[in-house]
Image (cartoon, helix red, strand yellow):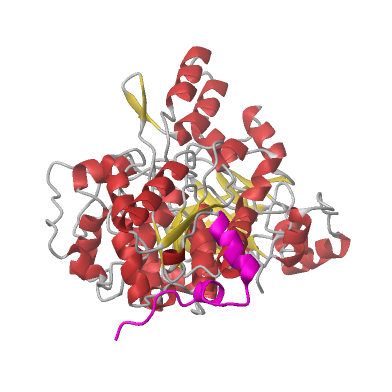
Amino acid sequence: MVKKINNFSKKITETDDLPASHAMLYAIGIKDTDFKKAQVGIVTNWYEGNPCNIHLDKLGKIVKQSIQNKNKLNVFQITTIGVSDGITMGTSGMRYSLPSRELIADSIETVIHSHHYDGVIAIPGCDKNIPGVMMALLRLNRPSMIIYGGSISSGLYNKKKLDIVSAFEAFGEKNVGNISQEQYKQIIKHSCPGPGSCGGMYTANTMASAMEAIGMTLPYSSSYPATSKNKEIECQHSEQYIYNLLKYNITPKDIVTKNSIENGIKLAISLGGSTNLIIHFLAIAKCANIKLELKDFQYLSSITPVIGNLKPSGKYLMEDIHKYIGGMPVIIKYLINEGILNGNCLTVTGQSLYENVKNLPNINFKNQKIIYSLKNPIKENGHIKILYGNIATKGSVAKISGKEGLYFRGIAKVFNSEEEANTAILKNNIKKGEVIVIRYVGPAGGPGMPEMLKPTSYIMGAGLSKYVALITDGRFSGGSHGFVVGHITPEAYYGGVIALIKNGDFIKIDSENNTITLEVEETEIKKRRQFWSPNKSKIQIGYLYKYMKTVSSASEGCITDQ
């Protein structure tokens, strides 16, 4: 039997002793006939300062108009924050990127709870937006769905496709004289041609793909380009799905299960996705009351081949999946049929993941090199490695595609900030065979665990990617590639062994045995610890100060609601 769908809003709209509440609802245009309708919040991460987010208000208005046309629900637009990783990368502003995830989740929870909305449609863009809204939806656990804002179109210069990482790497190329100042300027001008999230399998597209595999978006949401007619149609169709979710009281915790989370992780790994998925999925799982640990990522990576020839390690962009593969559901169908994904999981359509895709054409491996067959994968198992050792007793995360090799032993070159490392790379002070160590940039030490895309891009641009490694207690952008290890825990700020490394020490990274080792005797490490003292935090006031006091380690998802 179908129940009433205004389970939360009726506490305000159908209560006689809240006259001021009713007066304010009349003031915003609610009519007498609307008071018994369910109320839905449309939450966008819209702001004008970032291509990933600039169009989200337009998408939200399409959703709102579609719902109003049916006249079954009351609908209200809400805007929460976002931080542009691309704009803040390499600056002090990047410290706010990961912490913005918590603000997004907290702000959505605050508005929906306080106003007693019955359901939510969330429209995120940039990469912290997606886990932020997902965390909020799980905490709220009211009928909800996500519409991904979509990825950007590729840029073009000199007959070469470009994206945001092209811009970062161009600086390194210019610095070593491989391109001219004019070529550099043209690459910058043409890398980002309009609205949409960064086009490779970077963090935004990684998380969007994962949300589709989990079942929290409609089919195709992750692969429809931001400016496509398909994205507008998806927004228009959302009305019928949010109504059905309300009607049958299907909530995020009905959809987000251990099996569906594993689906999301495995799809992301198969496409060569960002290492950021680890801290985001750890946080999402906690909000869903599902046990998930670092060892689970190692296991899932070990049984999931990489078949996506996608940037940054590969060649293609999300727009190519849309144009040449037929969209993400075609890949999902293939992975279900091959036993990689569990097709029985419930989705926001009210049907299972398999039912959503079963009637689609099978993937065609001829005449395309974007998605490979499992019979001939790019990599037999996943590119994500969880490494342990005396440097990382609580774990670390490596992104090893195999192109850079599986083993690296080199001499430590230590930096206590990203800025120092960037200066050294640009001054050509990094030599082949060195392991760059960037520390005091963890969740508390940063604070905010900024991404190290600048140094990894400079390394790539300088042609050093095969000859040096980089380790850090910070994290990496989805656009980073090379022999890199991040999320080192315990972090330097709390006296982790990474804080005790000295220039000239040998460091061994073995991705086959999943180890990262400082080749220094334990007695020497203990001696160094006696002379170590914690650095005073760079931040003594404001949100980042509160964040560093409450944030968990990277191995626990960098969450603050403990």
Stretch in magenta: 1-27
Does residue 8 show up magenta in the picture? yes
Residue farthest toward the bottom in the current orientation of the protein: 1
| Residue 334 position in % (x across, y down) | 19, 61
Q: Which residue is rendered at x = 71% and y = 41% of the image?
A: 92
| Residue 117 position in % (x across, y down) | 51, 67
Quarter of the image for residue 545 reads bottom right
Q: Nearer the viewer, residue 265 or 288?
A: 288
| Residue 228 position in % (x across, y down) | 30, 39
Looking at the rendered image, the quarter that the N terminus falls into is bottom left
Residue farthest toward the front in the current orientation of the protein: 32
Q: Which residue is rendered at x = 58% and y = 36% of the image?
A: 87
Q: In the rendered view, would you say 361 is above or below 317? A: below
Does residue 23 show up magenta in the picture? yes
Quarter of the image for residue 357 reads bottom left
Q: Answer with left or right where residue 15 lies relative to residue 403.
A: right
Q: Which residue is rendered at x = 61% and y = 60% of the image?
A: 107
Q: In the rendered view, would you say 71 is above or below 371? A: below
Q: Nearer the viewer, residue 395 or 226?
A: 226
Looking at the rendered image, the quarter that the C terminus falls into is bottom right
Q: Answer with left or right where residue 372 lies relative to residue 555.
A: left
Q: Nearer the viewer, residue 456 or 234?
A: 234
**Any part of residue 317 in sight:** yes
Q: Nearer the viewer, residue 77 or 175?
A: 77
Q: Which residue is rendered at x = 50% and y = 14% of the image?
A: 180
